[in-house]
Image (spheres, rainbow, N blue to C red):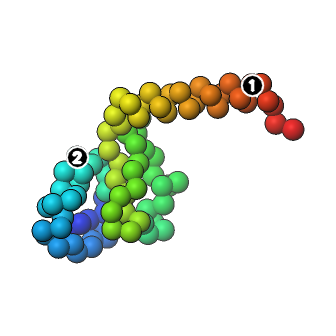
Amino acid sequence: MQIKCSNCGFEQYMKDHKFNRDYKDDYNKALFVMCGRNACDTSQIKIPNGFIREAMWLGSWSIVRDITLDEYKGLKRARFIRKLAEEQCPKL
């Protein structure tokens, strides 16, 4: 199986039996599949709202997938706590 980066087009070979057993569902559900090369640095790629970047298999490869409801609630709670802390403890 050839896995292809959505951004730069880099391809990497992976054995079919391992890919089908472990990674096929994640790969098919992903909006983007990104390799770990410098050209695909996440600071250069805008991740749309409602999606989350998840570090995955094959070393530094990652996927951008739909965010689940539990992850969204956790993210919203973390932003609220950070905002509250910034209001109570201004930077020195």
* Residue drawn at x 34%, y 34% as measured from the top left: 68
- Residue 47 quadrant: top left
In percent of width and height, residue 49 lies at 41, 35
The answer to whether residue 78 is left or right of residue 90 is: left
Q: Is residue 32 above or below residue 39?
A: above
The answer to whether residue 12 is left or right of residue 79 is: left
Q: Indicate the secondary structure of the residue bearing disc 1.
A: helix
Q: Amino acid at mark 2?
A: Lys
Depth check, front residue: 60 or 38? 60
In percent of width and height, residue 46 lies at 45, 46
Q: Amino acid at mark 1?
A: Glu
- Quarter holding the C terminus is top right
Q: Is residue 54 above or below residue 78?
A: below
Q: What is the number of the mark on residue 29?
A: 2
Q: Say which residue label 1 marks.
A: 87
Crowdedness of circle 1 by 10 Å Cα count: few (<14), some, many (20+)?
few
- Quarter holding the N terminus is bottom left
Q: Can residue 50 be seen by looking at this rendering? A: no
- Residue 8 quadrant: bottom left
In percent of width and height, residue 13 lies at 22, 75
Q: Indicate the secondary structure of the residue bearing disc 2.
A: helix
Q: Can residue 42 be seen by looking at this rendering? A: yes
